Image (spheres, rainbow, N blue to C red):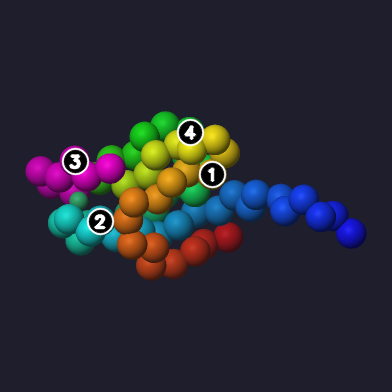
């Protein structure tokens, strides 16, 4: 049995808490992801050593 949890890479459907724009992002993003909504530059995900730190509402996890 493998005791080390393998970080699963998947895509997440997220919603910007500021403008409600919905977008698909990669949960292991290696670059800063900002909102793609109009006139919105809210940070959605920040790289945090492997898994990205998500700063948005996760609506759905897509495999
Ligand atoms: Zn936004």
Counting residues from the N terminus, which is met first, the one under dot 2 or under dot 4? 2
Residue drawn where x is 89% and y is 59% of the image: 1
Closer to viewer: mark 2 or mark 1: 1
| Other residues around mark 3 within 10 Å, as few (<14) / some (14–19) / many (≥20) | some
Residue 18 place in picture, x, y as percent: 17, 55
Residue highlighted by disc 3: 41
Q: Is residue 18 above or below residue 36?
A: below
Residue 8 place in picture, x, y as percent: 63, 52
Q: Do the residues labelled 2 and 1 touch (CB within 8 Å)?
A: no
Q: Does the residue labelled 2 lie within 8 Å of ligand 1?
A: yes
Residue highlighted by disc 4: 30
| Other residues around mark 2 within 10 Å, as few (<14) / some (14–19) / many (≥20) | many
- Mark drawn on residue 16: 2
Residue highlighted by disc 1: 51
* Cα distance in 3D space between marks 1 and 3: 21 Å
Q: Find the magenta span and give its range.
A: 37-43
Counting residues from the N terminus, which is met first, the one under dot 2 or under dot 1? 2
Secondary structure at numbered mark 3? loop
Residue 42 is covered by the magenta coloring? yes
* Cα distance in 3D space between marks 3 and 4: 18 Å
Q: Do the residues labelled 3 and 2 touch (CB within 8 Å)?
A: no
Q: Residue furthest front?
A: 3
* Cα distance in 3D space between marks 2 and 1: 19 Å
Magenta: main secondary structure: loop
Counting residues from the N terminus, which is met first, the one under dot 1 or under dot 3? 3
| Other residues around mark 1 within 10 Å, as few (<14) / some (14–19) / many (≥20) | some
């Amino acid at each position: 049995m493998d005791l080390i949890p393998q970080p699963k890479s998947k895509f997440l459907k997220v919603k910007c808490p500021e403008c409600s724009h919905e977008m698909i992002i990669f949960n292991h993003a290696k670059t800063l992801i900002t909102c793609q909504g109009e006139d919105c530059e809210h940070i959605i995900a920040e790289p945090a050593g492997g898994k990205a730190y998500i700063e948005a509402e996760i609506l759905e996890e897509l495999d």
